[in-house]
Image: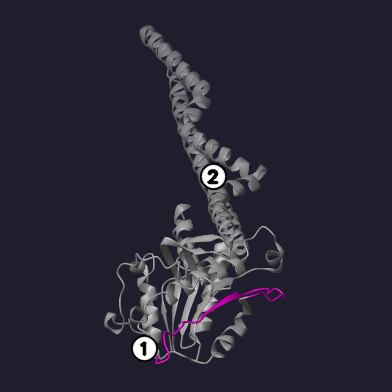
Amino acid sequence: MIKIYGKIESLKKIRTALIDHGLTEFNSIGEINTFQQNYDAEVRRIREEAELEVARDEELLDIENIKLEKELDQLREQVIAGIDKEIEELQQRIIAREHKESKNIFQRIVNKSILTVLRFRKQRIEKSSQNRVKKATADLVHKIEQIEILLKPYASNKAAIIERRIAPKLSIIEYTKGVLEEINPLIAGAIGEHKVEKELEGLSINGVLINDFSVNFDPPIYNRKEKDRIYSVQIDHLLITGAGIFVLETKNWSKKSIERLDLRSPVAQVKRSSYALFVLVNSTNDRLLGLMDHHWGKKQIPIRSLIVMIGQKPKENFKYVKIKTLSELNGYIEHFEPIFKDEEIYNIAHYLRSQQRDDTNVSKKKGTRISNSSSFFVKDRKKSINDHYKDRWS
């Protein structure tokens, strides 16, 4: 069984990058992949949804316009009917007065005056009828005019309305897409490292896998051959088995990436990390590492350097570093004969975890936690280790 500790480094970087860009909706690589795969479909969905909304809004405006037009006609008819009634009543009074006869001169004068007033009132009503209708229906006419103003763009430029509707939502997902494209190398790296982790879980041997192993060196380790002072290393996966330690660097590269001259050589990277780790473990007392005594002398812990290629793989072979595809990985690791017992494996792993830059963030993903009592724990390592095994690493 493989015990797994630590989170994949690329996942941490992805989370940080997303938060820095204000994106908090993604909780896994799977969710990011789903977003990228569904991006075009989501754009179509947003557009179709906007088209339906615009059509629905236009329909609602049409319905409201028809309703108001009907109310306007009814109100106009009511006002006109009221005016006609007033005119008819005045006309009847006029006719009645015209047919009223009186021998009294005073009564005739009064009757004539009343007729004059009635005719004047009738004329005034007739002249003001249009204004009265207009005034009574002004509010409804205004509402209808406003709706017609709103309806006009739907008839002349509906496409522009749709574009304005979808702009805010498209802006958000386009921004998200841009951020994900920007951090795509991190995403590819995380996918690759996750695949390696899942592949190593399938090993038929016992071991410990430490993801994102990071350690500082003070004073730095000096690689005399490369004239390199190593102050720290970061390793994608550190696998400890009965055969020793495997330093794994994962690359999810395309053929184009492999041929690029501006990308840092993963061979040089993993060799540098392996050298530092070789010096670290093989300059440490066996008791601190939790190794069992051997009657021949101090046991050396083999360090093997591996680059795991998820996509394309270079045709060339390289000194001191093996290049393997994901399908070749476990077979290569299981090929080596074990030289350490399970207790020693866990003790070495425990020691290495104690040396990490920030062991408080290391999380257990599988198996049980290794008890501190099963190994020796080093709290402070100040002694220089440059003088150990300088010439034994090529």
Q: Secondary structure at mark 2?
A: helix
Q: Residues within 10 Å of mark 1 (few under 14, many from 20)?
A: some
The residue tagged 2 is 65
Residue 58 point in image, percent of width and height = 57, 49
Amino acid bearing label 2: Asn
Residue 198 point in image, percent of width and height = 51, 81
The residue tagged 1 is 292
Q: Residues within 10 Å of mark 2 (few under 14, many from 20)?
A: some
The magenta span reads 293-319
Q: Does 48 sit left or right of 143 as displayed?
A: right
Report the residue that reaches farthest toward the left. Answer: 373
Task: Tell me, yes or no, whether the highlighted magenta stretch contains residue 315.
Answer: yes
Residue 330 point in image, percent of width and height = 56, 86
Which one is nearer the viewer's eye here, 340 or 77? 340
- Residue at 57% from the left image edge and 48% from the top image edge: 167
The image quadrant where one finds the N terminus is bottom left
